[in-house]
Image (cartoon, helix red, strand yellow):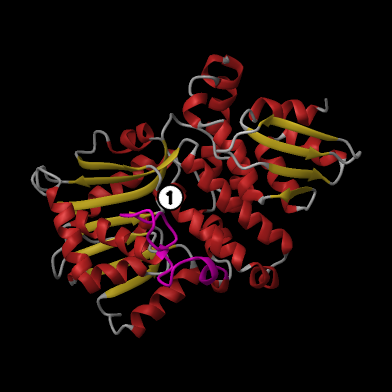
């Protein structure tokens, strides 16, 4: 049995994975199961299989991107789903910790990872967010919400789920007309424009992406609210003034653990005495870890998804009251499913923008991430903090009530 077959046999127990090797041989791995989608793959050359054995996640991604790992029956989503579903996160918890060399290596890798994250923040942001506007138009909703949506019903459209996400966050911010809001990592401006339109709050959105800044400012001008919703190309650490509310959606993943305390200290200093902030971030359900090699190299250089313990350590001792922590478990998987479907449907346009390799890379990124939220150890955290013990009601009823009002308005 080839080395790759032994490797895959340890991973696939339910469902059938048929492997066609470059030498013409074929091996069937797993056991038939009507609840699992069977998948057939082909290796174009012997080196492709060896690359995956040496570096499973990065190797599989690169071999698929290069056309050397070919999915013949099913697609890359079916393959990743089969592998991840057979090895869910809950069944792996504690396995690596029992092997001290792996644990020691992980600790060293985390330290190196965090040093790298401290460098060239703007360059790292530009790598991903300054891609063609046309690409994002092809798979995002019209408001370009490039973060986890909120599915009040799993059958909802992406547009409805993203609108519900904005309402869910706005409800937790307890906004009133005229309040000053800081949006850290404002993207293309959708959240800032929504908060003003729905509540009358005045918003400053900050970003490190020049492309996002241009779009956000143009949207505010077109809506006639550029005097109330402003955007700036500035690092949050250089923002001055006082704000009644701070919101940060999908930006905390780029802060880096070494800077969590500085992030929360800066936010505390910017908040008014009865101010409230909300951080919406991808997170780990386990302990601290290391960014996946494929994601770090191709998708989000400098990015890191924090564990809840790392986030809490960031604000502990700063006299910020943790007033609400919500865990969104499957919402991002559902979001990514729809992004993947739209990406796949737009194959010709994306290949024309970039090339076939980029298209396959984007497919791998979206479906790999979806599987990590559905079967792996990723989730989304919404963490609400305030400077006053009394700034937020003592029950959570207000959230649903405010959401309903926002949806109706």
Residue 151 belongs to the span the image colors magenta: yes
- Residue extending furthest toward the front: 34
Residue at which label 1 appears = 332
Residue at the image position 16 percent from the left and 64 percent from the top: 405
* Residue 177 or residue 204, whichever sits in front: 177
Q: Please identify the quadrant where the C terminus is shown.
A: bottom left
User: Does 29 sit left or right of 217 as displayed?
Assistant: right
Residue 111 higher or lower than 393, as above or below: above
- Residue 300 visible: no
Image coordinates of residue 277 in percent, x first then y, are: 24, 51
* Residue 338 or residue 65, whichever sits in front: 338
Find numbered disc 1 in the image and state the secondary structure of the residue it sits on: helix
Image coordinates of residue 197 in percent, x first then y, are: 24, 74
Mark 1, other Cα within 10 Å: few <14 / some 14–19 / many ≥20:
many
Residue at the image position 57 percent from the left and 20 percent from the top: 104
Image coordinates of residue 126 in percent, x first then y, are: 55, 62
Q: Please identify the quadrant where the N terminus is shown.
A: top right
Residue at the image position 52 percent from the left and 66 percent from the top: 139
Residue 206 higher or lower than 366, as above or below: below
Which quadrant would residue 207 be assigned to in this image?
Answer: bottom left
Q: Magenta region: which residues?
A: 135-158
User: Does 14 sit left or right of 9 as displayed?
Assistant: left
Residue 19 higher or lower than 5, as above or below: below
* Residue 36 or residue 144, whichever sits in front: 36
């Amino acid at each position: 049995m080839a080395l790759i077959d032994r490797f895959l046999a340890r991973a696939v127990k339910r469902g059938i994975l048929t492997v066609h090797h470059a030498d013409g041989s074929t091996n069937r791995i797993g056991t038939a199961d009507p609840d699992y989608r069977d998948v057939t793959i082909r290796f174009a050359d012997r080196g492709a299989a060896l690359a995956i054995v040496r570096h499973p996640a990065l190797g599989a991604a690169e071999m698929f991107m290069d056309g050397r790992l070919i999915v013949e029956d099913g697609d890359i989503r079916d393959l990743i789903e089969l592998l991840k579903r057979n090895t869910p996160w809950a069944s792996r918890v504690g396995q690596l910790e029992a092997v001290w060399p792996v644990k020691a290596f992980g600790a060293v890798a985390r330290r190196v990872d965090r040093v790298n994250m401290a460098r060239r923040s703007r360059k790292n942001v530009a790598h991903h967010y300054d891609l063609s506007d046309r690409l994002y138009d092809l798979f995002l909703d019209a408001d370009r919400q490039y973060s986890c949506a909120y599915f009040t019903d799993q059958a909802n459209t992406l547009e409805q789920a993203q609108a519900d996400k904005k309402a869910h966050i706005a409800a937790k911010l307890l906004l009133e007309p005229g309040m000053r809001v800081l949006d850290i990592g404002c993207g293309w401006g959708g959240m800032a424009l929504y908060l003003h339109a729905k509540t009358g709050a005045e918003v400053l959105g900050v970003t490190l992406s020049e492309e996002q800044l241009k779009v956000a400012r143009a949207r505010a001008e077109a809506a006639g609210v550029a005097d109330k919703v402003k955007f700036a190309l500035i690092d949050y650490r250089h923002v001055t003034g006082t704000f009644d509310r701070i919101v940060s959606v999908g930006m905390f993943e780029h802060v880096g653990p070494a800077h969590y305390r500085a992030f929360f200290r800066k936010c505390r200093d910017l908040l008014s005495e009865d101010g409230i902030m909300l951080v919406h971030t991808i997170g780990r359900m386990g302990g601290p870890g290391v960014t996946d090699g494929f994601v770090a190299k191709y998708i989000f250089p400098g990015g890191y998804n924090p564990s809840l313990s790392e986030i809490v350590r960031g604000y502990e001792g700063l006299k910020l009251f943790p007033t609400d922590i919500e865990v969104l478990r499957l919402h991002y998987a559902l979001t990514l499913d729809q992004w993947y479907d739209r990406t796949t449907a737009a194959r010709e346009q994306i290949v024309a923008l970039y090339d076939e390799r980029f298209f396959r890379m984007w497919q791998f990124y979206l479906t790999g991430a979806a599987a990590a939220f559905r079967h792996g150890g990723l989730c989304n955290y919404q963490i609400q903090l305030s400077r006053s013990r009394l700034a937020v009601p003592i029950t959570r009823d207000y959230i649903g009530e405010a959401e309903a009002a926002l949806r109706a308005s």
